[in-house]
Image (cartoon, rainbow, N blue to C red):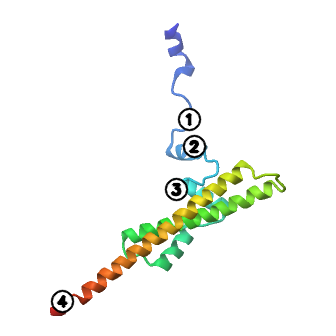
């Protein structure tokens, strides 16, 4: 009996995506709100749905902070992602409020968005402070090197 089941046409490889494109598409099946999304595919979908472009925000943040090295650039990316996620949360909040025109109490999805927004509100000032601290330390280090006796002798 076991032999017959193993030889049946349905005992072969199960369904599911086999190509890289199919696997990438299926990886987004469980994407509910995307607020915690990290994959580039998910972030691209969210950006197109919300009308908020992460690359545009990143360019603006880089232009404002002018990162001088890799660490500063990573901190600038963190700031841009926080700003992007806040804009995304704002868009989602508007959709939820439009869907539930006169709720007696906030729905769970609205509460989840608000919790998420508070978390991002915590991370954004931290990233800004880390970048400002690094730039301040570098400026002090550079100004001390310019004023040191060694540099005067040379």
User: Which of the marked residues, 3 or 1, is nearer the chain's N terminus?
Assistant: 1
User: Which of the marked residues, 3 or 4, is nearer the chain's N terminus?
Assistant: 3
Residue occupying the point 35% across, 82% down = 139
Nearer to the camera, 30 or 86: 86
Residue for badge 1: 16
In this view, which residue lies farthest toward the right? 102
Give the secondary structure at mark 3: helix
Image position, residue 34 (x, y; %): 60, 53
Nearer to the camera, 141 or 30: 141
Check the image and report above or below for 42 versus 1: below
Q: Quadrant of the C terminus?
A: bottom left
The local crowd at label 3, few if under 14, some if 14 to 19, many if 20 or more residues have their Cα within 10 Å, is: few
Say whether residue 102 is left or right of residue 91.
right
* CA distance separating discs 1 and 2: 9 Å
The answer to the question of whether label 1 and label 2 lie on touching residues, with beta carbons closer than 8 A, is: yes
Give the secondary structure at mark 4: helix
Residue for badge 3: 40
* CA distance separating discs 3 and 2: 14 Å
* CA distance separating discs 3 and 1: 22 Å
Residue for badge 4: 149
Which of the 4 image quarters holds residue 69?
Answer: bottom left
Residue for badge 2: 26
The answer to the question of whether label 3 and label 2 lie on touching residues, with beta carbons closer than 8 A, is: no
């Amino acid at each position: 009996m076991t032999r017959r089941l193993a030889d049946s046409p349905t005992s072969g490889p199960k369904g599911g995506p086999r190509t890289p494109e199919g696997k990438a598409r299926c990886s987004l099946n469980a994407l509910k709100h995307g607020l915690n999304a990290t994959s580039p595919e998910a972030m691209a979908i969210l950006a197109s749905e919300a009308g908020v472009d992460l690359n545009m925000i990143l360019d603006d943040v880089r232009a404002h902070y002018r990162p001088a090295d890799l660490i500063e650039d990573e901190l600038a990316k963190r700031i841009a992602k926080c700003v992007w996620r806040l804009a995304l949360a704002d868009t989602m909040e508007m959709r939820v409020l439009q869907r539930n025109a006169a709720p007696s109490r906030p729905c769970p999805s609205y509460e989840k968005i608000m919790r998420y927004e508070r978390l991002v509100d915590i991370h954004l000032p931290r990233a800004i402070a880390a970048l400002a601290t690094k730039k301040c330390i570098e400026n002090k280090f550079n100004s001390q090197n310019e004023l040191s006796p060694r540099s005067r002798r040379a």
